[in-house]
Image (cartoon, grey):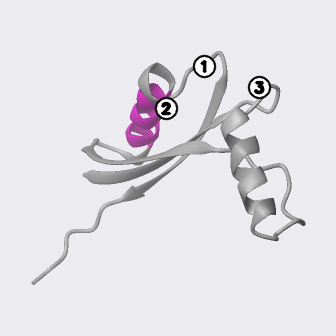
Amino acid sequence: MKYHAKVIVTLRKSILDPQGKAVEHGIHSLGFTSVENVRVGKFIEFDFEARTYEDAKQLCTEVSDKLLANPVMEDFTFVVEEKRERSQ
């Protein structure tokens, strides 16, 4: 079966996020002063094949843990969906 994964990688809460602070400052300078605790992360999408949904989740976990996220300073979450082929 074909699957589609959406992975979000963020810095752990205990890690300072200077890019997030810079974005927050920019948001405030635009007048949106109620915005706070801005964090910046990465969003990665990919398609792949797996035999089962459980295998698909396992593959996504391994790819995220071994390549997409630095396990020392980043966390990740993901969604795996079965990819539907479009009929024409």
The residue lying furthest to the left in this view is: 88
Q: Earlier in the sequence, mark 1 or mark 3?
A: 3
Disc 3/disc 2 C-alpha distance (Å): 22 Å
Query: What whole-number distance in Å separates the C-alpha atoms at marks 1 and 3?
Result: 12 Å
Side of 38 where 46 appears, left or right: left
Q: Residue flagged by tag 2: what amino acid is it?
A: Thr
Per the image, the residue denoted by label 2 is 61
Q: Position of residue 45 (x, y in %)?
A: 38, 49
Number of on-image labels: 3
Residue of label 3: 15
Residue shown at 35% from the left, 45% from the top: 52
Left or right of 77? Residue 79 is left
Nearest to the eye among marks 3 and 2: give it.
Answer: 3
Residue at horizontal 80%, vertical 33%? 13
Q: Which residue is mark 1?
A: 71
Between disc 2 and disc 1, the foreground one is 1
C-alpha separation, residue under disc 2 versus residue under disc 1: 12 Å
73 left or right, relative to 47: right
Residue 17: x %, y % from top left:
73, 34
Q: Residue at x 64, y 44 (%)?
A: 40
How many C-alpha atoms fall within 10 Å of the one at disc 1: few (<14), some, or many (≥20)? Answer: some
Instruction: Specify start and end residues of the magenta stretch as a single range.
Output: 54-64
Disc 2 crowd, CA 10 A, few/some/many (<14, 14-19, 20+):
some
From the image, give the main secondary structure of the stretch colored magenta.
helix
Badges 1 and 3: C-beta atoms under 8 Å apart? no
The secondary structure type at the circle numbered 1 is loop
Occupied quadrant, residue 14: top right
